[in-house]
Image: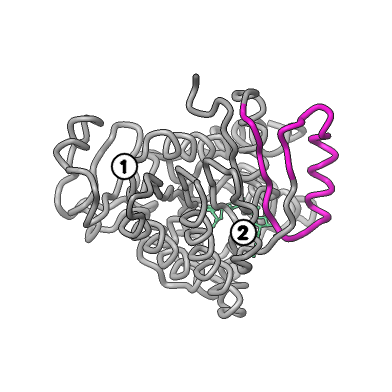
Amino acid sequence: MGFFSNKSILITGGTGSLGKALTSHFFKNYPDIKRLVIFSRDEQKQFQMDQEYPVDKYPQIRFFVGDVRDKERLTRAMKGIDYVIHAAAMKHVHIAEYNPDECVKTNIMGAQNVIDACLNSNVQRVVALSTDKAAAPINLYGATKLASDKLFVAANNITGWNPIKFSVVRYGNVMGSNGSVIPFFLSKKNSGTLPITDSNMTRFNISLQGGVDLVMHALEHAWGGEIFVPKIPSYRILDVAEAVAPECEKKIVGIRPGEKIHEEMITSSDSYYTYDLGKYYTILPSTSKWKLEDFVTAFKAKKVPVGFKYNSGENTEWETVDGLRKLIKNHVDLSFDI
Ligand SMILES: NC(=O)c1ccc[n+]([C@@H]2O[C@H](COP(=O)([O-])OP(=O)(O)OC[C@H]3O[C@@H](n4cnc5c(N)ncnc54)[C@H](OP(=O)(O)O)[C@@H]3O)[C@@H](O)[C@H]2O)c1
């Protein structure tokens, strides 16, 4: 019996970029799951996804209209669920700056509701999605995701007899995800001008599949309280513009409210709790139900040096313009001309 055999999985934000990639991954690789519940607000997005996954071909799929702000609805949805992936969020930095209370309600109150609903049912594993913007936040989106991370990590302290495990995965820009820079540049390509916020700007880059793999790793292997961080390359925003449309003028428009020039996934203050697991880093909780020595032995984990930080501007691995072109064709737009 595999880890996912006959298990019921719920994805909050299941109609989003990551939710859809996870859905496709589950049906391709784990056809023996019992149920896959998509939980989100907009019936139209669910209707469209329902066309892609008709119930006669995918009898395990269920669509639940609901808001993570509504604990009662979440609690009902969690009945019979084994594993939860919490991907629902407000994620646009400038929109969160302008509507801070809305972002707090979804990203923080929603996170606590997910935790409470899981604790009140028989859920065994919960993985919450975080972002590099949560590491040393300067914008409200990052601050709400940091609060959410803290809630999920600390949830392991209030489980009592319940064997449930909560963990977090944290990564950078997902190539081609809703509202991200590559589709934005592609949409502007024919105008002859690409707006660049700052010519020094860098970001961590991960594919949707890379994000899916990290979630699957955390679901299966977390001991509770870890924040998993993948080792991924960075890109310069100017290189992305060059890869998408070398013919376009690059017009510097200035950074938007709440934006940083570089992103940080692990700060030097986190280095005291950070371990290298080979493919991933993990920031460990300050208190846990398991012993650090056992964790280190089980995962051959190596402590990073004190002062270590993982910053997109100081990365040792970089995407090149040519490499980006291939990635865009493979992961974002099949018709992209390289
Ligand atoms: N994309 C990235 O570059 C990136 C990078 C790092 C981390 N992340 C994190 O990864 C997660 C998923 O991101 P994504 O790119 O898949 O986002 P996305 O495409 O914008 O999808 C967000 C999903 O959440 C749902 N949602 C939003 N508010 C909700 C609410 N109040 N209650 C229930 N569902 C709600 C949306 O559907 P409805 O609107 O219909 O409710 C949608 O299904 C987020 O937590 C984000 O912070 C993303």
Residue hosting label 1: 281
The residue located at (47%, 59%) in the rendering is 115
Instruction: State the residue at coordinates (44%, 61%).
Output: 133
Q: Which residue occupies 61% across, 76% down? A: 102
Q: What x and y, as percent, mark residue 98?
A: 61, 80
Element at label 2:
helix
Residues shaded magenta: 33-62
Q: Earlier in the sequence, mark 1 or mark 2?
A: 2
Q: x, y percentage for residue 220?
A: 43, 34
Residue 158, picture quadrant: bottom left
The amino acid sitting under disc 1 is Tyr
Is 44 within the magenta? yes
Nearest the eye: 12 or 90:
12
**Left/right of residue 308 with respect to residue 136 in the rendered view:** left
Q: How is the image coloured?
A: one colour
Q: Is residue 337 magenta?
A: no
**Which residue is drawn at the image coordinates 39% and 46% (left, top)?**
165
Q: Which residue is mark 2?
A: 74
Q: Residues within 10 Å of mark 1 (few under 14, many from 20)?
A: many
Q: Report whether residue 313 is seen.
A: yes
Q: How many labels, in total? A: 2
**Can you give x and y, in whole percent of width and height, for residue 298 in the image?**
23, 30
Q: Quadrant of ligand 1?
A: bottom right
Marks 1/2: CA–CA distance: 31 Å
